[in-house]
Image (cartoon, rainbow, N blue to C red):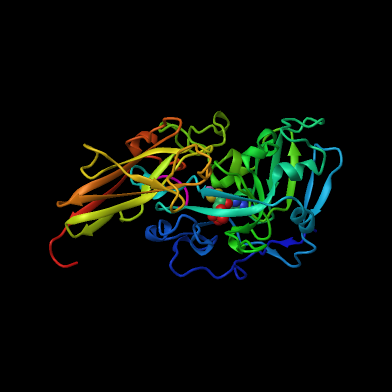
Amino acid sequence: MAGLTAPSDYSQDPPRHPSLLINAKQPFNAEPPRSALVASYVTPSHFFYKRNHAPIPIVQDIHRYSVFLSGLVECPKQLFMKDIWKLPKYNVTATLQCAGNRRTAMSKTKVVKGVGWDVSAIGNAIWGGAKLSDVLELVGIPKLASVTQFGGRHVEFVSVDKCKEENGGPYKASIPLSQATNPQADVLLAYEMNGEVNEIDLDHGYPLRVVVPGVIGARSVKWLEDLNIIAEECQGFFMQKDYKMFPPSVNWDNINWLTRRPQWISQFSVICSLEDVSTIKPGKIKISGYAVSGGGRGIERVDVSVDGGKTWMEASRFQKSGVPYMSEHSSSDKWAWVLFEVTADILHSTEIVAKAVDSAANVQPEKVEDIWNLRGILNTSWHRVKVQASHSNL
Ligand SMILES: Nc1nc2c(c(=O)[nH]1)N[C@H]1C(S)=C(S)[C@@H](COP(=O)(O)O)O[C@H]1N2
Ligand SMILES: [Mo]
């Protein structure tokens, strides 16, 4: 068919970096240690979190691999890699984050369902590929179209992996056509990650994946097989029965999935230079981490407290070295996280807290209890770490 095969066991999964913290072995779900995450603005692919629902699909012959673009369009088309390589290539620096990032901490309030993650189900990469808006033009869908002449309003991305949540069917998701045809939305069919020529790691979607900047990672379908132009949004499990946020009162007995929209992303700031409980030598302590918002919004401010939230100081923010970070400025990568850093004198055991403000003036909620939800997604609450000051040699 399109040249992608989906193994039914894990024996062909690729080797992975030994420092990754494994949350589930099969399917493979892992995140890097906190310190590795903030060691660089661009996350090396071996440290980029891996979020899978099935064994990794394999391509036998890259030249025979193709994506089928069909549905509510006049002339469906089979696209080979050479057709996609021919289109203008864009490099987009974009952060992907799983909606389940920081789920483990949410589970401590009251148990939630889903793979546990610490704070590193996130990474920032330079994705190289064709814009989806250019690809759609190949079948006659113009830029900025929000509906096709046959009533298509959504673009569905379908893979081949055999997910148990889909009863053995493939992973799939969709975005509105208006987003897909908007060149400014930077939606990519990516065949490169971090500048390796025509290469994307097997774990991250080789040979072709979708990258939808500014929204939860779940929409960025890996190992793309089909692009369907459809009238209603994708009805797959991962769109309709997962990755939606409910209020704290909803439980597994009274849940009605239809009452909520598929979830977007909202802002996070996380301290990565310290674990949840760390022992420190009293004195100057560097506190660093990442802050990210959704929808391309910038980070206006990151506030850090070293007294549990009574008083705050502003951290410095940066993306590229030597370029001062300015939210919503043309010199900033709008889809990418912002790293922050501040040095504080810490003499006693205390709690360190971080919270960010984005360019739409959104502030993170203080308490995880207030945003608890049964699927354990979008734990955007203030990030807190406890430090124990110890004068003895560490
Ligand atoms: N085909 C396919 N695409 C997928 C997934 C998957 O399991 N299969 N997982 C999704 C989820 S939930 C996330 S958060 C991101 C993770 O991308 P990464 O593993 O490259 O970090 O991919 C998304 N795309
Ligand atoms: Mo995810």
User: Residue, x 66% and y 41% (percent of image)?
Assistant: 174
41 sits left or right of 197 in the view: left
Residue 11: percent from left, percent from top: 60, 70
User: Could you tell me which residue is drawn at 53 percent across and 61 percent down?
Assistant: 45
Q: Report the front residue among 216 and 346.
A: 346
**Quadrant in the picture for the N terminus:** bottom right
Asked whether, in this view, residue 117 is left or right of residue 75, the answer is left
Is residue 187 toward the left or the right of residue 62 in the image?
Answer: left
Query: Does 233 appear above or below 26?
Result: above
Measuring from the top left, give residue 5's x and y in whole percent. 72, 62
- Residue furthest out toward the right: 75
Which residue is at the front of the view, 153 or 235? 153
> Which residue appears farthest toward the front when viewing the image?
322
Tell me, yes or no, if residue 319 can be seen here.
Answer: yes
Residue 257 % position (x, y): 55, 34
- List the single residue furthest toward the left: 391
Q: Is 163 left or right of 385, judged from the image as shown?
A: right
Which quadrant of the rendered structure holds the C terminus? bottom left
Residue 107 seen in this snapshot: no
- Judge whether residue 155 is colored magenta: no
Query: Bounds of the magenta span?
Result: 111-115
Instruction: Kindly indicate the quadrant of the structure image that contains residue 36.
Output: bottom left
Q: Is residue 113 magenta?
A: yes
Q: Quadrant of residue 154?
A: top right
At horizontal 79% and vertical 40% (from top left) the residue drawn is 71
Residue 303 lies in what quarter of the image? top left
- State the predominant SS element of the stretch in magenta: loop
How many marks can you see? 0
Q: Position of residue 108 (x, y in %)?
A: 33, 46
